Amino acid sequence: KKQTRKMPSSALLNKTAKVDYMNLDCQGRVQAMYIWIDGSGEHLRCKTKTLDSEPQTPDDLPLWNFDGSSTNQAEGSNSDCYIKPIALFRDPFRGDPNKLVMCEVLNYKQEPVATNNRRRCRAIMENVKEDRPWFGMEQEYTLLDVDGHPFGWPKGGFPGPQGPYYCAVGTGNVYGRDVVEAHYRACMFAGVKIAGTNAEVMPAQWEYQVGPCEGIEMGDHLWISRFLLHRVCEDFGIIATFDPKPMKGDWNGAGCHTNYSTEAMRNKGGIAAINKAVEKLSKRHFSHIKAYDPQGGKDNLRRLTGMHETASIYDFSSGVANRKASIRIPRHVS
Protein backbone atom coordinates (compact mmCIF):
# COMPACT_ATOMS: atom_id res chain seq x y z
CA LYS A 1 0.00 0.00 0.00
CA LYS A 2 1.47 3.32 -1.04
CA GLN A 3 2.06 5.74 1.81
CA THR A 4 0.50 9.16 1.30
CA ARG A 5 1.35 12.38 3.06
CA LYS A 6 -0.51 15.65 3.42
CA MET A 7 1.13 18.99 2.65
CA PRO A 8 3.32 19.81 5.69
CA SER A 9 2.33 22.97 7.55
CA SER A 10 5.87 24.34 7.17
CA ALA A 11 5.44 24.40 3.39
CA LEU A 12 2.42 26.67 3.75
CA LEU A 13 4.15 29.27 5.96
CA ASN A 14 4.79 32.75 4.57
CA LYS A 15 8.53 32.62 3.88
CA THR A 16 8.83 36.40 3.61
CA ALA A 17 7.85 36.79 7.29
CA LYS A 18 11.14 35.12 8.22
CA VAL A 19 13.33 37.62 6.38
CA ASP A 20 13.27 40.33 9.05
CA TYR A 21 14.43 37.86 11.69
CA MET A 22 17.27 36.58 9.52
CA ASN A 23 18.54 40.16 9.16
CA LEU A 24 18.80 40.78 12.91
CA ASP A 25 22.22 41.59 14.41
CA CYS A 26 23.42 38.48 16.29
CA GLN A 27 26.08 40.39 18.26
CA GLY A 28 29.01 38.53 16.73
CA ARG A 29 27.74 35.09 17.68
CA VAL A 30 27.69 32.27 15.12
CA GLN A 31 25.32 29.38 14.41
CA ALA A 32 27.02 26.10 13.51
CA MET A 33 24.77 23.35 12.16
CA TYR A 34 26.30 19.95 12.88
CA ILE A 35 25.37 17.37 10.21
CA TRP A 36 25.85 13.60 10.37
CA ILE A 37 24.75 10.34 8.72
CA ASP A 38 22.41 8.26 10.86
CA GLY A 39 22.24 4.50 11.42
CA SER A 40 20.54 3.87 8.09
CA GLY A 41 23.77 4.80 6.30
CA GLU A 42 21.81 7.02 3.91
CA HIS A 43 19.77 9.58 5.87
CA LEU A 44 21.08 12.79 7.38
CA ARG A 45 20.47 14.43 10.75
CA CYS A 46 21.40 17.90 12.04
CA LYS A 47 21.36 20.15 15.09
CA THR A 48 22.65 23.67 15.73
CA LYS A 49 25.15 25.02 18.29
CA THR A 50 25.87 28.67 19.13
CA LEU A 51 29.52 29.74 19.02
CA ASP A 52 31.09 32.95 20.33
CA SER A 53 33.22 33.43 17.23
CA GLU A 54 33.54 32.21 13.64
CA PRO A 55 35.44 28.93 13.38
CA GLN A 56 38.22 28.77 10.80
CA THR A 57 38.88 25.02 10.85
CA PRO A 58 36.98 21.95 12.12
CA ASP A 59 39.39 21.86 15.08
CA ASP A 60 37.91 25.17 16.28
CA LEU A 61 34.59 23.43 16.96
CA PRO A 62 33.88 21.34 20.08
CA LEU A 63 32.98 17.66 20.15
CA TRP A 64 29.20 17.42 20.69
CA ASN A 65 26.74 14.66 21.49
CA PHE A 66 23.26 13.45 20.51
CA ASP A 67 20.77 10.70 21.35
CA GLY A 68 22.03 7.75 19.34
CA SER A 69 19.05 5.60 20.33
CA SER A 70 16.85 7.88 18.19
CA THR A 71 19.07 7.44 15.12
CA ASN A 72 19.64 3.67 15.39
CA GLN A 73 23.25 4.19 16.46
CA ALA A 74 23.10 3.33 20.18
CA GLU A 75 21.03 1.50 22.79
CA GLY A 76 18.61 3.47 24.94
CA SER A 77 20.43 2.37 28.10
CA ASN A 78 23.66 3.92 26.80
CA SER A 79 22.38 6.39 24.25
CA ASP A 80 24.99 9.14 23.95
CA CYS A 81 26.92 9.31 20.68
CA TYR A 82 29.46 11.98 19.79
CA ILE A 83 29.67 14.06 16.64
CA LYS A 84 33.18 15.12 15.66
CA PRO A 85 33.52 18.04 13.20
CA ILE A 86 35.57 17.10 10.13
CA ALA A 87 34.70 19.65 7.41
CA LEU A 88 33.40 23.23 7.35
CA PHE A 89 31.13 24.88 4.78
CA ARG A 90 29.42 28.27 4.58
CA ASP A 91 25.73 28.24 5.49
CA PRO A 92 23.63 29.48 2.53
CA PHE A 93 20.42 29.59 4.59
CA ARG A 94 21.65 31.67 7.52
CA GLY A 95 24.42 33.47 5.66
CA ASP A 96 27.95 34.38 6.78
CA PRO A 97 29.57 33.89 9.26
CA ASN A 98 27.38 30.87 10.06
CA LYS A 99 28.59 27.37 9.18
CA LEU A 100 27.51 23.92 8.09
CA VAL A 101 29.64 21.31 9.85
CA MET A 102 30.07 17.81 8.42
CA CYS A 103 30.67 15.38 11.28
CA GLU A 104 31.55 11.76 11.83
CA VAL A 105 29.82 9.73 14.55
CA LEU A 106 31.64 8.16 17.51
CA ASN A 107 30.30 5.89 20.26
CA TYR A 108 30.55 6.48 24.01
CA LYS A 109 34.18 5.33 23.90
CA GLN A 110 34.80 7.94 21.18
CA GLU A 111 35.44 5.17 18.67
CA PRO A 112 33.74 5.07 15.22
CA VAL A 113 30.23 3.60 15.19
CA ALA A 114 29.47 0.76 12.75
CA THR A 115 28.06 3.14 10.11
CA ASN A 116 31.02 5.53 10.30
CA ASN A 117 32.46 4.59 6.92
CA ARG A 118 34.38 7.83 6.67
CA ARG A 119 37.04 6.77 9.17
CA ARG A 120 37.81 3.63 7.15
CA CYS A 121 37.71 5.53 3.88
CA ARG A 122 40.11 8.18 5.17
CA ALA A 123 42.62 5.50 6.16
CA ILE A 124 42.48 3.99 2.67
CA MET A 125 42.84 7.38 1.00
CA GLU A 126 45.87 8.10 3.15
CA ASN A 127 47.45 4.83 2.00
CA VAL A 128 47.04 5.75 -1.68
CA LYS A 129 47.62 9.50 -1.50
CA GLU A 130 50.66 9.18 -3.80
CA ASP A 131 48.26 8.06 -6.56
CA ARG A 132 46.27 11.31 -6.18
CA PRO A 133 42.83 9.67 -6.65
CA TRP A 134 40.24 12.00 -8.16
CA PHE A 135 36.50 11.47 -7.95
CA GLY A 136 33.66 13.06 -9.87
CA MET A 137 30.22 12.07 -8.59
CA GLU A 138 27.05 12.23 -10.71
CA GLN A 139 24.11 12.29 -8.30
CA GLU A 140 20.70 11.58 -9.83
CA TYR A 141 17.52 12.26 -7.85
CA THR A 142 13.77 12.55 -8.34
CA LEU A 143 11.50 15.34 -7.13
CA LEU A 144 8.29 14.11 -5.51
CA ASP A 145 5.15 15.85 -4.37
CA VAL A 146 4.26 15.26 -0.72
CA ASP A 147 1.91 12.45 -1.78
CA GLY A 148 4.92 10.50 -3.12
CA HIS A 149 3.94 11.02 -6.79
CA PRO A 150 6.64 12.57 -9.02
CA PHE A 151 6.44 16.35 -8.99
CA GLY A 152 4.52 17.81 -11.92
CA TRP A 153 3.09 14.47 -13.09
CA PRO A 154 -0.69 14.28 -13.59
CA LYS A 155 -2.31 13.11 -10.36
CA GLY A 156 -3.19 9.46 -10.74
CA GLY A 157 -1.61 9.43 -14.20
CA PHE A 158 1.58 9.67 -16.19
CA PRO A 159 3.26 12.14 -18.56
CA GLY A 160 4.20 11.18 -22.11
CA PRO A 161 6.87 8.53 -22.73
CA GLN A 162 10.55 9.25 -22.13
CA GLY A 163 12.38 11.01 -24.90
CA PRO A 164 11.88 14.79 -24.70
CA TYR A 165 12.93 15.26 -21.06
CA TYR A 166 16.71 14.68 -20.98
CA CYS A 167 18.61 18.00 -20.84
CA ALA A 168 15.30 19.58 -21.85
CA VAL A 169 13.89 23.08 -21.73
CA GLY A 170 10.33 24.33 -21.76
CA THR A 171 7.08 23.89 -19.88
CA GLY A 172 5.88 20.31 -20.11
CA ASN A 173 9.43 19.06 -20.61
CA VAL A 174 11.01 20.04 -17.28
CA TYR A 175 9.57 19.78 -13.79
CA GLY A 176 10.95 21.67 -10.78
CA ARG A 177 13.78 23.75 -12.25
CA ASP A 178 13.33 26.34 -9.46
CA VAL A 179 14.53 23.76 -6.93
CA VAL A 180 17.49 22.83 -9.12
CA GLU A 181 18.64 26.44 -9.51
CA ALA A 182 18.27 27.15 -5.79
CA HIS A 183 20.26 24.02 -4.90
CA TYR A 184 23.00 24.89 -7.42
CA ARG A 185 23.48 28.37 -5.91
CA ALA A 186 23.33 27.02 -2.36
CA CYS A 187 26.14 24.56 -3.18
CA MET A 188 28.32 27.26 -4.74
CA PHE A 189 27.80 29.59 -1.77
CA ALA A 190 28.60 26.79 0.68
CA GLY A 191 31.86 25.94 -1.09
CA VAL A 192 30.71 22.56 -2.37
CA LYS A 193 32.55 21.65 -5.57
CA ILE A 194 29.41 21.35 -7.67
CA ALA A 195 30.41 21.00 -11.32
CA GLY A 196 27.11 21.12 -13.20
CA THR A 197 23.51 19.98 -13.47
CA ASN A 198 21.01 18.72 -16.06
CA ALA A 199 17.50 17.36 -16.41
CA GLU A 200 17.50 13.56 -16.62
CA VAL A 201 15.64 11.02 -18.79
CA MET A 202 12.57 10.59 -16.57
CA PRO A 203 10.47 13.74 -16.06
CA ALA A 204 10.96 15.24 -12.56
CA GLN A 205 14.35 13.52 -12.43
CA TRP A 206 17.54 15.60 -12.29
CA GLU A 207 21.27 15.15 -11.89
CA TYR A 208 24.05 17.28 -10.49
CA GLN A 209 27.78 16.60 -10.48
CA VAL A 210 30.31 17.12 -7.69
CA GLY A 211 34.05 17.21 -8.31
CA PRO A 212 36.71 16.68 -9.18
CA CYS A 213 37.57 16.06 -5.55
CA GLU A 214 40.73 14.39 -4.33
CA GLY A 215 40.64 11.67 -1.68
CA ILE A 216 38.31 11.93 1.31
CA GLU A 217 37.11 15.39 0.20
CA MET A 218 34.88 13.51 -2.25
CA GLY A 219 32.60 12.12 0.45
CA ASP A 220 32.39 15.33 2.47
CA HIS A 221 31.32 17.42 -0.53
CA LEU A 222 28.85 14.82 -1.80
CA TRP A 223 27.10 14.41 1.56
CA ILE A 224 26.84 18.17 2.12
CA SER A 225 25.39 18.56 -1.40
CA ARG A 226 22.73 15.98 -0.49
CA PHE A 227 21.98 17.81 2.75
CA LEU A 228 21.60 21.07 0.84
CA LEU A 229 19.18 19.46 -1.62
CA HIS A 230 16.92 18.17 1.16
CA ARG A 231 17.10 21.53 2.94
CA VAL A 232 16.22 23.48 -0.23
CA CYS A 233 13.27 21.15 -0.83
CA GLU A 234 11.97 22.04 2.64
CA ASP A 235 11.59 25.65 1.52
CA PHE A 236 9.69 24.60 -1.61
CA GLY A 237 7.47 22.06 0.18
CA ILE A 238 8.48 19.09 -1.99
CA ILE A 239 10.65 16.00 -1.58
CA ALA A 240 13.90 14.83 -3.17
CA THR A 241 14.45 11.08 -3.23
CA PHE A 242 17.60 9.15 -4.14
CA ASP A 243 15.62 5.93 -4.53
CA PRO A 244 17.17 3.86 -7.36
CA LYS A 245 13.79 3.11 -8.96
CA PRO A 246 11.11 5.51 -7.70
CA MET A 247 8.65 4.55 -10.46
CA LYS A 248 8.06 1.01 -11.70
CA GLY A 249 7.63 0.35 -15.38
CA ASP A 250 9.22 1.89 -18.44
CA TRP A 251 10.98 4.70 -16.56
CA ASN A 252 14.67 5.27 -15.89
CA GLY A 253 15.99 4.76 -12.39
CA ALA A 254 18.41 7.01 -10.52
CA GLY A 255 21.97 6.29 -9.46
CA CYS A 256 25.10 7.98 -8.21
CA HIS A 257 27.76 7.32 -10.84
CA THR A 258 31.42 7.53 -9.91
CA ASN A 259 34.03 8.96 -12.26
CA TYR A 260 37.48 8.00 -11.03
CA SER A 261 41.11 8.39 -12.03
CA THR A 262 44.58 8.20 -10.56
CA GLU A 263 47.51 10.31 -11.65
CA ALA A 264 48.79 7.39 -13.74
CA MET A 265 45.45 7.23 -15.55
CA ARG A 266 45.55 10.96 -16.28
CA ASN A 267 49.08 10.91 -17.67
CA LYS A 268 50.00 10.14 -21.27
CA GLY A 269 49.38 6.46 -22.01
CA GLY A 270 47.02 6.27 -19.04
CA ILE A 271 44.61 3.94 -20.86
CA ALA A 272 46.89 1.05 -19.83
CA ALA A 273 46.36 1.89 -16.15
CA ILE A 274 42.61 2.22 -16.74
CA ASN A 275 42.39 -1.19 -18.40
CA LYS A 276 44.37 -2.77 -15.55
CA ALA A 277 41.94 -1.28 -13.01
CA VAL A 278 38.92 -2.49 -14.99
CA GLU A 279 40.33 -6.02 -14.98
CA LYS A 280 40.72 -5.91 -11.19
CA LEU A 281 37.17 -4.60 -10.76
CA SER A 282 35.82 -7.48 -12.86
CA LYS A 283 37.13 -10.01 -10.34
CA ARG A 284 35.29 -8.42 -7.39
CA HIS A 285 31.97 -7.55 -9.03
CA PHE A 286 29.57 -9.09 -6.51
CA SER A 287 31.53 -7.86 -3.50
CA HIS A 288 31.29 -4.35 -4.87
CA ILE A 289 27.58 -4.64 -5.69
CA LYS A 290 26.91 -5.49 -2.03
CA ALA A 291 28.84 -2.41 -0.95
CA TYR A 292 27.15 0.05 -3.32
CA ASP A 293 24.02 0.62 -1.23
CA PRO A 294 23.04 0.26 2.44
CA GLN A 295 20.71 -2.65 1.61
CA GLY A 296 23.61 -4.81 0.38
CA GLY A 297 22.66 -4.39 -3.26
CA LYS A 298 18.92 -5.03 -2.87
CA ASP A 299 17.93 -1.48 -3.77
CA ASN A 300 20.06 -1.50 -6.92
CA LEU A 301 18.53 -4.84 -7.88
CA ARG A 302 15.43 -2.85 -8.89
CA ARG A 303 17.48 -0.51 -11.10
CA LEU A 304 20.29 -2.57 -12.64
CA THR A 305 18.13 -4.67 -14.95
CA GLY A 306 20.08 -4.35 -18.20
CA MET A 307 17.43 -1.92 -19.44
CA HIS A 308 17.06 1.86 -19.21
CA GLU A 309 20.76 2.56 -19.76
CA THR A 310 22.00 0.10 -17.12
CA ALA A 311 24.04 -3.08 -17.03
CA SER A 312 22.54 -6.18 -15.41
CA ILE A 313 23.42 -6.41 -11.73
CA TYR A 314 24.53 -10.02 -12.33
CA ASP A 315 27.10 -9.29 -15.03
CA PHE A 316 30.28 -7.24 -15.18
CA SER A 317 31.07 -5.43 -18.41
CA SER A 318 33.07 -2.48 -19.69
CA GLY A 319 33.13 -0.52 -22.91
CA VAL A 320 33.86 2.80 -24.56
CA ALA A 321 30.83 5.13 -24.55
CA ASN A 322 28.60 2.14 -23.69
CA ARG A 323 25.83 3.20 -21.30
CA LYS A 324 24.79 -0.41 -20.78
CA ALA A 325 28.21 -1.39 -19.37
CA SER A 326 29.22 -1.57 -15.71
CA ILE A 327 32.28 0.57 -16.45
CA ARG A 328 31.95 3.18 -19.18
CA ILE A 329 35.14 4.72 -20.54
CA PRO A 330 34.31 8.09 -22.16
CA ARG A 331 35.14 8.37 -25.84
CA HIS A 332 37.57 11.25 -25.37
CA VAL A 333 39.42 9.27 -22.66
CA SER A 334 39.78 6.28 -24.97
Image (cartoon, rainbow, N blue to C red):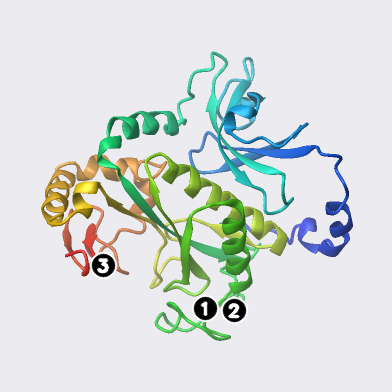
Residue 113 % position (x, y): 49, 24
**Marks 3 and 2, how far apart in space?**
30 Å
Residue holding disc 2 = 154
Residue 104 % position (x, y): 53, 31
Q: Which mark is residue 323?
A: 3
Question: Closer to the camera, 143 or 180?
Answer: 180
Q: Quadrant of residue 152?
A: bottom right
Residue 80 % position (x, y): 63, 20
For the residues bearing labels 3 and 2, Cβ distance under 8 angstroms: no
Q: Quadrant of the N terminus?
A: bottom right
Q: Quadrant of residue 97?
A: top right
For the residues bearing labels 2 and 1, Cβ distance under 8 angstroms: yes
User: For the residue labelled by badge 3, is the local secondary structure a helix, a strand or a loop?
Assistant: loop
Disc 2 marks a residue whose amino acid type is Pro
What residue is rendered at 18% in x and 53% in y? Answer: 316
Left or right: 307 in relation to 15: left
Q: Quadrant of residue 117?
A: top left
Q: Nearer the viewer, mark 3 or mark 2?
A: 3
Does residue 21 lie above or below 29 as drawn?
below
Residue holding disc 1 = 158
User: For the residue labelled by badge 2, is the local secondary structure a helix, a strand or a loop?
Assistant: loop
Disc 3 marks a residue whose amino acid type is Arg
What residue is rendered at 48% in x and 49% in y? Answer: 222
What residue is rendered at 32% in x and 31% in y? Answer: 124
Q: Nearer the viewer, mark 3 or mark 1?
A: 3
